[in-house]
Image (cartoon, helix red, strand yellow):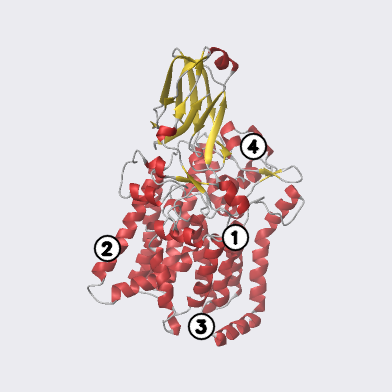
């Protein structure tokens, strides 16, 4: 690869970093750190504050954090009655330089240096963008070894802007997927480098990278197939590969030793909090290998990979093309043709095969580097068949980019639902820039309990507006049920529900967005009676409810108005199942 091409890749990587950074600034509530440090991220990230700020791996410090973090940070009790983090610590290692910079910024800018203020959240987003940009650079270099530079550049750009990696390297950039995408890409690059010139340094780098890959997600250890089978074309080639490993056994021992060494802190942590060096932190979550959801995971409208990331269908076609190539360009065929179906099988055998709230099949993002080669083959063939063909292929690729960017925007604005999409809902929002009034009625909520404990894929239609009622009693006289409808609120606005004179109630049940925080205020004759923040808990499968216990004053004196504010953000929220009893 010529020096000028390397410079061009570096320049493109910098431009991509800038685009993703400013896109993140526009799509994330940067005044609210919980918009970045939430859900899976808390379980990956909390190792760093625990070790470097509080020196407390048993997580007792969480009890002294502001209530929003006490509620938000995932942990569970082990059999030794100590609090533990569900996720392994691999991602925390990649976060580390950015966490330290965030800590410095928090101190200098006088934000709370508690590990959970705005500077830490911003630096986690920067981390995801940085590793995505680095992955782009190494993907470009890898592809340029086998294709024209133009094909390598186009393919590398498509992997970011035409796939759901775009979401997970920007607004959701602190999640694990952009980091895993980088590690996979780097591992493949170092694999090629090792076979060009076997040496200890490259073997050590491969061991470190493989250790981190498995420490973030153990099932991603399947990537070892690429190191073992790269450039193996037939049985003779496999025998030659085995001889190479025997002749360089010190390299292999060092590679394995470094990978194990990366795991040592995690094993010590598990032993400390559970009494076991090998501890399964996922509790009652597991795989159903006898019932993988292959068709739904690939083509279903809830989270179908090829529905929401259709460009990857070209990569799968590319696998077929690779089978008929000459030996020189067939180096990736055997590991890829083995890796891809096994990876699909494992990913879609997980009990929650749709992987919770996400855009598309996020679990496949990690392995997009393995599909870069077959995708590049399709693009190369499409652009080189004849001169006119490029005028067909290029618009198709541009459409894939447009579709992904548009649907990413729909996801960020809440129009494309994070877990309950159906074919009807998908067609209803196709090309729309505002949420259809009847969209909620078309969604089907998955039954998490049935999936987790029985491996059964059930889902239920959401209740429509005409099914939502408010009932109450005033001075012992029953009111007739009143239709509440769908209440829509934006930032700095509220829903206001009036009941005439007084309403007496024991509980207020509200279905809200599980990722947000709300302020609820009760008024009596326009005088504030009670006001507090509340957080969302899961009350039953697929329905997020918060049961708000009213104070004695409200129970005794009643109220005539309720106002509910989202804490930050500008997306619309839809309230249903709203009842006062």
- Residues at discs 1 and 2 in contact (Cβ within 8 Å): no
Relative vertical location of residue 173 with respect to residue 110 in this rendering, above or below: below
User: Which residue has dot 4 on it?
Assistant: 62
Numbered disc in front, either 1 or 3: 3
CA neighbours of label 4 inside 10 A, class few (<14), some (14 to 19), many (20+): some
Q: CA distance from mark 1 to mark 3?
A: 29 Å
Badge 1 vs badge 3, beta-carbon distance below 8 Å: no
Position of the N terminus by quadrant: bottom left
**Toward the viewer: 560 or 55?**
560
Q: Earlier in the sequence, mark 2 or mark 4?
A: 4
Cα distance in 3D space between marks 2 and 3: 35 Å
Residue 565 pos. (x, y %): 45, 28
Name the N-terminal-most of marks 1 and 3. Answer: 1
How far apart are the alpha carbons under marks 1 and 2?
38 Å
- Secondary structure at badge 4 equals helix
Which residue appears at 44% of the width and 66% of the height? 139
User: Where is mark 1, residue-wise?
Assistant: 212
Precedes in sequence: disc 2 or disc 3? 3
């Amino acid at each position: 690869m010529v020096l000028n091409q390397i410079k061009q890749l570096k320049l493109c990587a910098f431009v991509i970093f800038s685009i993703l950074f400013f896109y993140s600034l526009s799509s994330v509530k940067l005044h609210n750190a919980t918009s970045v440090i939430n859900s899976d991220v808390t379980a990956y990230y909390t190792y760093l504050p625990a070790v470097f700020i509080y020196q407390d791996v048993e997580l007792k410090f969480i009890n002294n954090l502001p209530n929003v973090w006490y509620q938000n940070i995932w942990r569970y009790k082990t059999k030794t009655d100590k609090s533990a983090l569900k996720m392994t610590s691999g991602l925390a290692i990649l976060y580390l330089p950015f966490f330290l910079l965030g800590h410095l910024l928090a101190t200098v800018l006088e934000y709370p240096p508690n590990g959970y203020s705005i500077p830490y959240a911003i630096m986690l987003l920067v981390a995801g963008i940085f590793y995505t940009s680095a992955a782009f650079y190494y993907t470009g270099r890898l592809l340029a070894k086998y294709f024209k530079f133009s094909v390598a550049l186009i393919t590398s750009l498509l992997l970011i802007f035409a796939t759901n990696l775009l979401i997970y390297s920007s607004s959701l950039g602190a999640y694990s997927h952009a980091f895993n995408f980088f590690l996979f890409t780097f591992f493949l690059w170092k694999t090629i480098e090792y076979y060009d010139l076997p040496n200890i340094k490259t073997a050590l780098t491969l061991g470190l990278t493989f250790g981190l890959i498995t420490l973030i997600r153990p099932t991603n250890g399947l990537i070892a197939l690429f190191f073992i089978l790269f450039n193996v074309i037939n049985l003779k080639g496999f025998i030659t590969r085995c001889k190479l490993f025997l002749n360089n056994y010190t390299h292999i021992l060092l590679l394995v030793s470094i990978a194990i060494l990366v795991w040592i802190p995690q094993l010590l942590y598990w032993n400390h909090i559970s009494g076991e060096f090998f501890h399964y932190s996922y509790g009652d979550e597991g795989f159903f290998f006898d019932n993988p959801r292959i068709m739904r995971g690939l083509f279903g409208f809830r989270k179908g990979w090829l529905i929401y990331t259709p460009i990857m269908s070209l990569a799968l076609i590319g696998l077929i093309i690779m089978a008929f190539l000459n030996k020189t360009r067939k180096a990736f065929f055997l590991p890829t043709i083995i890796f891809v179906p096994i990876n699909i099988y494992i990913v879609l055998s997980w009990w929650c095969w749709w992987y919770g709230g996400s855009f598309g099949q996020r679990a496949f993002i990690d392995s997009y580097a393995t599909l870069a080669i077959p995708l590049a083959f399709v693009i190369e063939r499409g652009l080189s068949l004849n001169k006119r063909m490029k005028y067909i292929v290029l618009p198709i690729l541009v459409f894939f980019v447009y579709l992904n960017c548009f649907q990413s925007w729909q996801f960020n604005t809440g129009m494309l639902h994070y877990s309950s999409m159906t074919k009807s809902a998908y067609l209803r929002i196709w090309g729309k820039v505002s949420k259809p009034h009847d969209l909620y009625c078309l969604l089907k909520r998955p039954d998490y309990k049935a999936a987790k404990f029985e491996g059964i894929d059930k889902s239920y239609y959401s209740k429509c507006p005409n099914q939502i009622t408010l009932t109450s009693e005033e001075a012992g006289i029953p009111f007739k049920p009143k239709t509440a409808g769908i209440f829509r609120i934006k930032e700095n606005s509220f829903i206001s529900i009036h009941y005439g004179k007084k309403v007496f109630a024991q509980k207020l049940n509200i279905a809200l967005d599980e990722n947000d925080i709300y302020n609820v205020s009760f008024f009596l004759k326009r005088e504030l009676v009670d006001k507090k923040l509340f957080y969302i808990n899961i009350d039953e499968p697929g329905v997020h409810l918060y049961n708000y216990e009213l104070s004695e004053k409200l129970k005794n004196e009643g109220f005539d108005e309720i106002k509910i504010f989202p804490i930050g953000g500008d997306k619309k929220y839809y309230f249903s199942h709203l009842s006062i009893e």
